[in-house]
Amino acid sequence: MIEGKTIAITRSKDDSQEFIDLITREKGNVLPLPTIELVGRGEKIVDEFLSALTEGDPDYSVFMSSKAVSLLFETAKKAGKFEELRLAVANTIVLAVGPRTKDALEKENVKVAYMPQRYSSVGIGEVFTKLNAVGKKVIIPRSGASTPFLKELLEKIGLDVTELYLYDVCAFR
């Protein structure tokens, strides 16, 4: 079905390899054409996240992408705060939105307690509904381009939600 067709991959350079491999395997022609790039907000994200964990004392940490996991933990390693971050996250109940995010967390020796059947914000909401987590606190490290949907959904369920923006999505330069 893909053989001989040319397909443009508009994802960021770091996120396109899986699709390039798939199309190549199916004998399609790949045109990498990144339209966005993900730009981290610097070393301050680690301190901001650690402060939010200390001050807010969340019950749960929710990771919505492997990108957020990689960026947060790699930045912590560079800043010499990896173990502090890992222990702080481990003191919460950790949710991963899907298998890639779960794998990224486990590579950093973080145990994932829950992963929804539907790999989406709605799936995360379903997990919290089943947990009867009303009144609990949640921290979500994520993209500055995230929609408010997840936060609003969890607040409707009765959770106290803190979002921390780790990176921005910018037009590819």
Image (spheres, grey):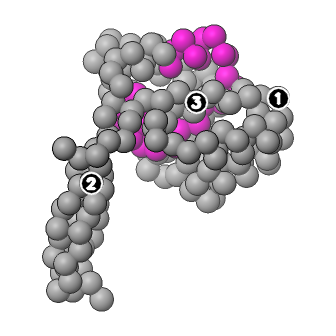
Residue 135's disc is 1
User: Where residue 69 sits: x, y (%)?
Assistant: 43, 35
- The residue located at (31%, 13%) in the rendering is 79
Question: Residue 70 is drawn in which quadrant?
Answer: top left
The CA span between labels 2 and 3 is: 26 Å
Q: Earlier in the sequence, mark 2 or mark 3?
A: 2
Q: Is residue 55 above or below residue 23?
A: above
* Residue 44 visible: yes
Label the magenta part by its dominant secondary structure.
Answer: helix
User: Where residue 6 sits: x, y (%)?
Assistant: 19, 78
Q: Earlier in the sequence, mark 1 or mark 2?
A: 2
Tally of numbered tags: 3
- The residue located at (61%, 42%) in the rendering is 148
Q: Is residue 169 magenta?
A: no
Q: Read off the magenta span.
A: 49-72
User: Pointer 3: residues within 10 angstroms few (<14), some, or many (20+)?
Assistant: some
Q: Are marks 2 and 3 in contact (CB under 8 Å)?
A: no
Image quadrant containing the C terminus: top left
Q: Using the image as rendered, state which of residue 158 and residue 169 is in the foreground.
A: 169
Tell us which disc is closer to us: 2 or 3. Answer: 2
Q: Are marks 1 and 2 in contact (CB under 8 Å)?
A: no
User: Where residue 152 sits: x, y (%)?
Assistant: 70, 41
Q: Is residue 64 magenta?
A: yes
Tell me the residue that label 3 is attached to: 163
Tell me the residue that label 2 is attached to: 35
Q: Using the image as rendered, state which of residue 163 and residue 119 is in the foreground.
A: 163
- Amino acid carrying mark 1 in the image: Gly
Residue at the limit of the structure toward the bottom, as seen here: 1
Tell us which disc is closer to us: 1 or 2. Answer: 2
The CA span between labels 1 and 2 is: 40 Å
Q: Earlier in the sequence, mark 1 or mark 3?
A: 1
Q: Is residue 67 above or below residue 50?
A: below
